[in-house]
Amino acid sequence: MSPDSPACSIWIGFCLAVRPILWARRCCGVPTAPVAKHRQYFVRASYIAETMDQLRNQTALTLDAPPAIAPVFIPGCSIRDVTFDCAFLDFVEVARRAMDPLAADRTN
């Protein structure tokens, strides 16, 4: 992912990217290639930031020198594997419980 990607429309040092992914998953939680049968949407959250060396050396972020990416565990939702995928419907429910709808800006 680069600073120009839609998931990171504002790039100031870091980005929290939450992207929907369509995967068929095996029973053990390891993602497989998307297939037509038993598809389900998952959400994968990632923290994307320049490394300390990139900040210190003012290294331009490029494909050859990308930012560091770390998966983010979503409590009450993420599957305990390396990607911390979260079933989309579970994510919606966790987000609904965590957010105050009256605090959202409904005009912008």
Image: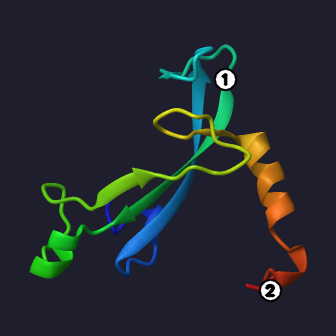
Please say if 34 is above or below 88.
above
- The dot on residue 95 is none
Find residue 40 and report its horizontal and vertical position in percent: 69, 29
- Local packing at callout 2 (Cα closer than 10 Å; few below 14, some 14-19, many 20+) is few
Please say if 82 is above or below 71.
above
Q: Quadrant of residue 14?
A: bottom left
Q: Quadrant of residue 39?
A: top right
Tell me the residue at 27%/62% (across/down).
Answer: 67
Q: Quadrant of the C terminus?
A: bottom right
Tell me the residue at 12%/74% (across/down).
Answer: 59
Alpha carbon separation for disc pair 2 and 1: 34 Å
Which sits earlier in the primary sequence, circle 2 or circle 1?
1
Q: Residue furthest right?
A: 102
Find residue 101 and report its horizontal and vertical position in percent: 87, 74
Q: Residue furthest left?
A: 57
Tell me the residue at 57%/28% (across/down).
Answer: 23
Find residue 74 and report its horizontal and vertical position in percent: 63, 51
Front in this rendered view, residue 35 or 55: 55
- Local packing at callout 1 (Cα closer than 10 Å; few below 14, some 14-19, many 20+) is few
Dots 2, 1 in contact, CB < 8 A = no
Residue 55 left/right relative to 72: left
Front in this rendered view, residue 4 or 70: 70
Please say if 53 is above or below 78.
below
The amino acid type found where label 1 is placed reads Arg
Tell me the residue at 62%/17% (across/down).
Answer: 36
The amino acid type found where label 2 is placed reads Thr
Front in this rendered view, residue 104 or 37: 104
Q: Secondary structure at mark 2?
A: loop
- The dot on residue 107 is 2
Q: Secondary structure at mark 1?
A: loop
**Which residue lies under the disc numbered 1?**
39
